[in-house]
Image (cartoon, grey):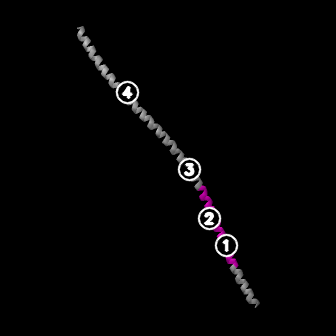
Amino acid sequence: MDDKILELLQRMNSKMDNLTDKVDRLEIKVDSLELKVDSIDVQQKENTQILRALESAKDVHFAKLDKIENEVAHLSGEVKNIRVNLNAVEGITAKNWNDIIDMKKLMQ
C-alpha cells in the first residue's frame, strides 16, 4: 500500500513539475508579449506625433497657398488695369502724333 501511495505521489509530483514548466513558459511568453506591446505603444505615440506635425505643416502650406492665390488675383487685376491705361496712352500718343503732323503741315 505504501508503494502505491508513493507511486501516486511521484506521478502527482511529475504532473506538478510539468504544470510548473508550462506556467514558466507561459510567463516567458507573456513577458515577451508585454515587451512587444510596449514597443508598439511607443511606436504608435511616435507615429501620432509625426502625423500631427504633418497635419500642422499641411495647414501652413494651405495658408501659404491661399496667400499666393490672393496675390496672383491682385496682380492679375493690376495687369488688366495697366493694359487699359496703356491702351489709353497709345490712343493719346497716336492723336498727339496726328496733331504734330497737322502742325508741321500748317508751318510749311
Q: Earlier in the sequence, mark 4 or mark 2?
A: 2
Q: Which mark is residue 82?
A: 4
| SS at mark 3 in the image | helix
Residue that appears at 42% across and 32% down: 75
Residue that appears at 35% across and 28% down: 83
Residue bearing the label numbered 3: 50
Residue bearing the label numbered 1: 23
Region of the chain picked out in magenta, as a range: 16-43
Q: CA distance from mark 3 to mark 2?
A: 25 Å
**Residue type pointed to by label 4:** Ile
- Picture quarter with the C terminus: top left
* Residue 82 against residue 31 in the figure, above or below: above
* Residue 83 against residue 4 in the figure, above or below: above
**Residue type pointed to by label 1:** Val
Circles 1 and 3: CB distance less than 8 Å? Answer: no
Q: Residues within 10 Å of mark 1 (few under 14, many from 20)?
A: few
Circle nearer the viewer, 4 or 2: 4
* Residue 57 against residue 96 in the figure, above or below: below
Circle nearer the viewer, 4 or 1: 4
| SS at mark 1 in the image | helix
Q: Earlier in the sequence, mark 2 or mark 1?
A: 1
- Indicate left or right for 66 with 108 as reference: right
Q: CA distance from mark 1 to mark 3?
A: 40 Å
**Residue type pointed to by label 3:** Ile
Q: Nearer the viewer, residue 7 or 81?
A: 81
Q: Residues within 10 Å of mark 4 (few under 14, many from 20)?
A: few
Q: Position of residue 30 (x, y in %)?
A: 64, 67
Residue farthest right in this picture: 2
